[in-house]
Image: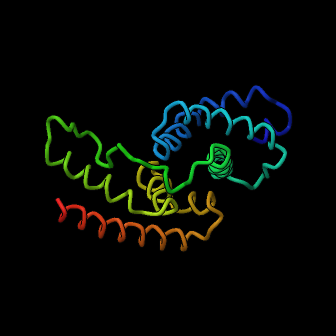
Amino acid sequence: MIKVREGQLNFAGLLFERYKKILFSFFYNQTRDKNLSEDLVQITFYKMMKYKHNFRDDSHFKAWIFTIARNAMKDEFKKRKVKMEDIGNHEHKFVEGTQADTNIVQYERSEFLKRALKHLSPEKRELLILIKLNGKKYREVAEILNLKESVVKSKVFRAIRELQNHYCQVKESF
């Protein structure tokens, strides 16, 4: 990114190739909308180029680009007049490698989890998506959200505990 900031724009393509899938996954896990996710990736890279002069030498690029991504998503939601609470109808499964048609138990668990996730606030859902689905480290998420790492750990712990409670309630109501 430093080279891009200094005017060597050919390196922007390299950054795009490295981060487009990661960003798409982040957006898709938030919105469940392929076209919107693709648009948000483009918007993120456009803003990266527009604000390249703001990148500091001591910054971590991944945290910086995810901050831009989060802000781009929020801006797009405001523009479309979509509430963050309405986003996140997660059809995905947290458990990898399961097939709903071949493993009914896993399917039921993922359905319970999906319903439990809907009860979480957008902030808590986002934290769990960043940490659990996108595999981000607490340190990275702290940089993205401009929080202390200990605060992120505490929020994730509370979000998981709340998710567990909702999961149990959903499971019992079935």
Q: Where's residue 102, x and y in %?
A: 14, 36
Q: How is the image coloured?
A: rainbow
Q: Residue at x 32, y 52 (%)?
A: 114
Q: Tell me: residue 158, above or below residue 45.
A: below
- For the point 67% across and 39% down, the residue is 44
Q: Position of residue 30 (x, y in %)?
A: 49, 47
Q: On the rendered image, what quadrant is the C terminus found in?
A: bottom left
Quadrant holding the N terminus: top right
Q: Position of residue 122 (x, y in %)?
A: 50, 59
Q: Is residue 11 left or right of residue 36?
A: right
Horizontal side, residue 4 vs residue 143: left or right: right
The answer to whether residue 67 is above or below residue 159 is above
In the rendered picture of this protein, how many numbered marks are placed on residues? 0
Residue 133 placement, left or right of 74:
left
- State the image coordinates of residue 171 (x, y, percent, origin top left): 20, 61
Question: At 49% from the left edge and 52% from the top edge, which residue is drawn?
Answer: 86
Q: Residue furthest front?
A: 81
Asked which quadrant contains residue 40, the reply is top right
Judge whether 81 appears above or below 156 on screen.
above
